[in-house]
Structure formats: structure tokens, C-alpha cells
């Protein structure tokens, strides 16, 4: 997905949020914001929005020496998700269709996104209602049965994690994927509240899940930024599961068997997909969005 | 008031709003926004935020030739206010204290502000509840009796209008000001949805109200941008009534008998004043804000 005009105020707001997380000094805030405005003014519009988020992240690190502004937010999100996990496990255990219930919980976890929803707090009262709505409401896009059948036929599945907190729900879902070879990929460096190896360790992952790093510090998955090892895994996967908005933004034009699992959280992405903010989505990247959400 | 960091995303959003009002061409939008980002990056933080709004306005005019992006919005706001006016007149007519009721209606009109509240539509359902709340709720700041008594002692009153639409309610209030020499000032050029001579004519003003232009196209009142004639009027006024946020932002540090009438609509201004968003304010500029809202 290219960058839309409406992404610009969000870039500025993300810069302010990150700057105020790492410093109390208004001089530092202004310096960071002024440099960010110049970066944004020069940003190539055909790049996806996460490429800008990565630049802002680098700028914050250069100006403040802090490479992980969202560390505290991520820790709190992990704790929130771990607190919800026993009840979620019970929902799956007592479900008539554990695969679909676990899948829905994994998508619901995508609400824990501090990039798209800045006013969300880790103990936010909106998290649980969103999970309930995602457990009950429609899933737009590929039918769940068809997704299950593709996974059952796959020799290798690559699962691209999105955010801290959310990754605990990914860990709940992965054992229900009907494929023995599932690799979970996290970011190589902290960026916004994206999950890294640290977050995977904080929430703990089920036995047998192989964890890899993309090697990249860009939200989503920009293949050119990733390690060769990761690119090989991506190329070898029969099914790629890509969580969250940033993965949609960076992979929606990539020719690969990518399946996006996400909550549509911002009007720009909803318009690009042709859906409504709040929708629960399972999209086949090989269909154009307008076809993908017909079903 | 100086410019705060939190004003920056608003500047960007205002640019986007204005650009999309004057052109459907994404190329134009991007060019305007990129240039605006550069202007914002270079903006001196000790200037008040309306100085930036004026620069954005000039930029839009340069890039698109359109000097009045909000023309349609203002026309609709004027029509909205005119539609409400008969009921407002009736409220004043049947009030035990017509001066205070008309004053409250004039402050309530300040909700019709497309600079601070971009999602407001001219037929917005929030306008009427806000008027009701402003008619009933407390006024923070100077006691209304004291304000009335200062006006009664004044030889000359200068009344600085803020927005289109709102100016119809200013016209309702002005005849209740106990002073025979009241001059109403509007902007010299269109900027955001600020009232100009055109808007005063669209809503019609009571007989005997003298209308002048500040000569300036900056929201609020930046005296250096105004004509000498206007500056003379400002200096000669015994009481200046200044409507709206932009007048607070531009005049809060000016030594003059200014009385701000406004609704606090953004968290930055509320913090600067020491009040809460939504508050109805009558502030004496000669008191520091923390003193002014004690009463």
C-alpha cells in the first residue's frame, strides 16, 4: 500500500508520542519534531507508511540514544495479554471449533496496537469488548474453512507477528494450525510496539514453535530490509500468515501466498481494503482487496 | 500564547483540510503538504499558533490561486446561525437577564469553529446541545456583573469577531452592551472560517453597529499585521471584547483591557488557561489565567 495524504498527521503524532516517551525535555521534542517534519516532507509517497515509521524510529534513536521508546508500553501490553490468556484458552478448549476460535482470538489481539490507536492504554477497557466482538462478529474475506484447508496442505507456514501483547494470542493460535512446520517471525529491532524476541520471551511461546527474526526494524515486512535467511524462509513458505495493518501495508503488493489477519483500525487502510473500520479480516493477498472481501 | 508541540499535528491537519477543500488533485495536495511541512519545521515556537495558520493560508493561495478555501463552510455556518437566531432572540426576550443570556449565546456561538474542531459539520447535531450547555452551565472567569459594569463605564468598546456563523450571535449580543460606541472588527482577508465583511453582510448586523476590518488575514488579532486605523481603534478602546481561541492565542500577552469570550475547544488552550475543554470562559487579560479563572 502506498502512503496516503491522511497518513501525514499520523506520522507527526507518532513522532510526538515517541519523543515524549523518551524525554521530558521540550528542546529535545522540538528538535526531533522539526527533523521529522523535514523527513516527512521528503518521504517518497510510493513507499508504504511503515517505511516512514522506521525513519522516525531511527531519528528518535539518533537524537536521544533511546532505541526502544515503547519498551514500557510493550511490557504492559504483554502483561495485559498474559492476564487474559487463561480465559482465552478456556474459550478455545470449550469451543465447538477450536481452530476458528483460536484464529479469532489471534485476530482480536491485533487491537493491541499503539501505532494505529495512540490513545489506547495497556489496561484499556476497549480491549475486552473488541475481543468479544471479534469472537462473535463476521470475518470478512477468505472463508475460514478454505484457510484451514490451505494450511492443512502446506508443507511450511511462516507466521509474521505484529505487536507485543498480541503475540501471546498468536502463541495460543499456532498449535491449532494444521501444519507441523510453523515458524514465527518477530522484528529484528524495536520499532513502535512491534513484537521482538524479548516480547516473545516475556509472553512465552508453546513448545515446538520455531522463532526467527526478520532482521528488520521496519514495522510490517519490507523484504529488502530483512536478512537473507528470513527472505529464504519467506520464499519457501507455502502459506504466509501476516498479522496486522503494517504487514498489510508492506506486503499487499508482494506476489506471495500471504494471508492477512487483522483488525482494520484506521480509515485509510479500511478505504484501501474496501472495508469498514473495526472489521475483522482474513484476506488472501492474491486476490485484489475488492475481490478478497466479497466472500 | 506560544505554540506548543501538540499544535503541530493540528497545523498539518488544517493544511490537509484546506487543500482538499480547494482541489481534487492529489498532486496539488502533496505539493501543498510538503511545502507546509517545511514551513512548520521552520516556524518560530514563540509565535502564537494563528501565525502558522496565516502562513498555511498564504501557501494554499500561492499553490492553488484559491484565497478562500472555507467559503462554502462559512456560508453554511452563516445559514445555520441564521436558522437558530429567531429562537435565540426569543430566549433573550423572555430572559430575566437579557444581557447575560445574550452574552452566553455569543459565547456559545464560538463552538462554530472549523479551525479547532475539524469534524464539525455545518448542520452538526453538537451545535445545539453546546448552546444549551452554555446557556445553563457556569461561566468561568470574571463575574458577569463586573463585566457589565466595566462596559457601562466604557466610552468606547471594540468587539473582535471570530468566526462566520458565530458572528450572527455577536450581532444578537451587541445591542445589549451598555455602551453607545461599539465597533465590531472582522478580518481583512479570508483565513480558515474567520468572519470577514462578507460574513457580516450575510448574517446582517443590527442598526448602528459600526463594522471595521482589522486589515489582517491572520486568525485572532496580531496587531502588527493590522492597519494603523485598526491599531488606533484598539488603543482607544476602554474595553476590548475578543471572541474565540485565536484571539486568546494572539492577545493573551498584550497589555490592554482585553476580555476574552470563548469556549475552550482544544486541550492545549485549556492547559494554557488552566481550565477544562468545554469550559465557557469570560477572561480578563489583565489577570494571569490562573487568577482569571479563580472567580
Image (spheres, coloured by chain):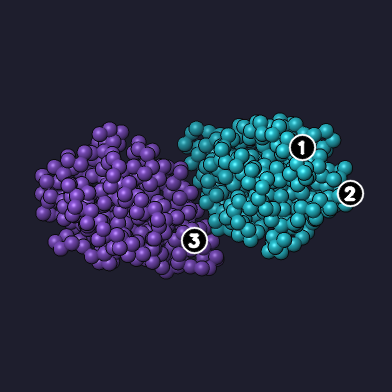
Chain colours: A purple, B cyan
Q: Disc 2 to disc 3, how far (Cα)?
A: 50 Å
Q: Chain of mark 2?
A: B
- Pick the residue in front: B205 or B13: B205
Same chain for labels 1 and 3? Say yes or no: no
Q: Secondary structure at mark 2?
A: loop
Read off the residue under disc 2. Answer: B155
The part of the image, by quadrant, that contains residue B89 is top right
Q: Position of residue B125 (x, y in %)?
A: 56, 38
Q: Disc 2 to disc 1, how far (Cα)?
A: 26 Å
Q: Residues within 10 Å of mark 3 (few under 14, many from 20)?
A: many
- Label of residue B93 in the image: 1
Q: Chain of mark 1?
A: B
Q: Secondary structure at mark 1?
A: helix
* Of the two numbered discs 2 and 3 in the rendering, the one whose residue sits closer to the viewer: 2
- Please give the name of the residue rendered at 63% of the width and 46% of the height, measured from the top-left corner: B133
- Please give the name of the residue rendered at 17% of the width and 47% of the height, measured from the top-left corner: A96
Q: Position of residue A87 (x, y in %)?
A: 26, 58
Read off the residue under disc 3. Answer: A32
- Pick the residue in front: A79 or B6: A79
Same chain for labels 2 and 3? Say yes or no: no
* Of the two numbered discs 2 and 1 in the rendering, the one whose residue sits closer to the viewer: 1
Amino acid at each position: 500500500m502506498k502512503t496516503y495524504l491522511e497518513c501525514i498527521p499520523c506520522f507527526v503524532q507518532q513522532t510526538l508520542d515517541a519523543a515524549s516517551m523518551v524525554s521530558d525535555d521540550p528542546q529535545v521534542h522540538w528538535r526531533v519534531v522539526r527533523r521529522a517534519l523535514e523527513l516527512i516532507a521528503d518521504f517518497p509517497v510510493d513507499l508504504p507508511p511503515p517505511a516512514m515509521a522506521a525513519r522516525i524510529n531511527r531519528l528518535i534513536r539518533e537524537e536521544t540514544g533511546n532505541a526502544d521508546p515503547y519498551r514500557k508500553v510493550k511490557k504492559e501490553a504483554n502483561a495485559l495479554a498474559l492476564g487474559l490468556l487463561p480465559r482465552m484458552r478456556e474459550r478455545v478448549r470449550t469451543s465447538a471449533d477450536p481452530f476458528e476460535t483460536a484464529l479469532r482470538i489471534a485476530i482480536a489481539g491485533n487491537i493491541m496496537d499503539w501505532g494505529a490507536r495512540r490513545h489506547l492504554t495497556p489496561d484499556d477497557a476497549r480491549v475486552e469488548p473488541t475481543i468479544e466482538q471479534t469472537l462473535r462478529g463476521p470475518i470478512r474475506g477468505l472463508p475460514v474453512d478454505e484457510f484451514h484447508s490451505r494450511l492443512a496442505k502446506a508443507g511450511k507456514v511462516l507466521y509474521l507477528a505484529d505487536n507485543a501483547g498480541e503475540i501471546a494470542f498468536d502463541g495460543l493460535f499456532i498449535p491449532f494450525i494444521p501444519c507441523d512446520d510453523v515458524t514465527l517471525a518477530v522484528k529484528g529491532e524495536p520499532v513502535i510496539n512491534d513484537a521482538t524476541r524479548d516480547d516473545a520471551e516475556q509472553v512465552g511461546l508453546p513448545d515446538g514453535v520455531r522463532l526467527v527474526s526478520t532482521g528488520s526494524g521496519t514495522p510490517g515486512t519490507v523484504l529488502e530490509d530483512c536478512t537473507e535467511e528470513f527472505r529464504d524462509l519467506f520464499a519457501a513458505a507455502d502459506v504466509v500468515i501476516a498479522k496486522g495493518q503494517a504487514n498489510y501495508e508492506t506486503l499487499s503488493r508482494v506476489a506471495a501466498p500471504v494471508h492477512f489477519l487483522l483488525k482494520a483500525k484506521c480509515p485509510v487502510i479500511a478505504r484501501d481494503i474496501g472495508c469498514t473500520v473495526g472489521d475483522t479480516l482474513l484476506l488472501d493477498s492474491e486476490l485484489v482487496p475488492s475481490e478478497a472481501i466479497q466472500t
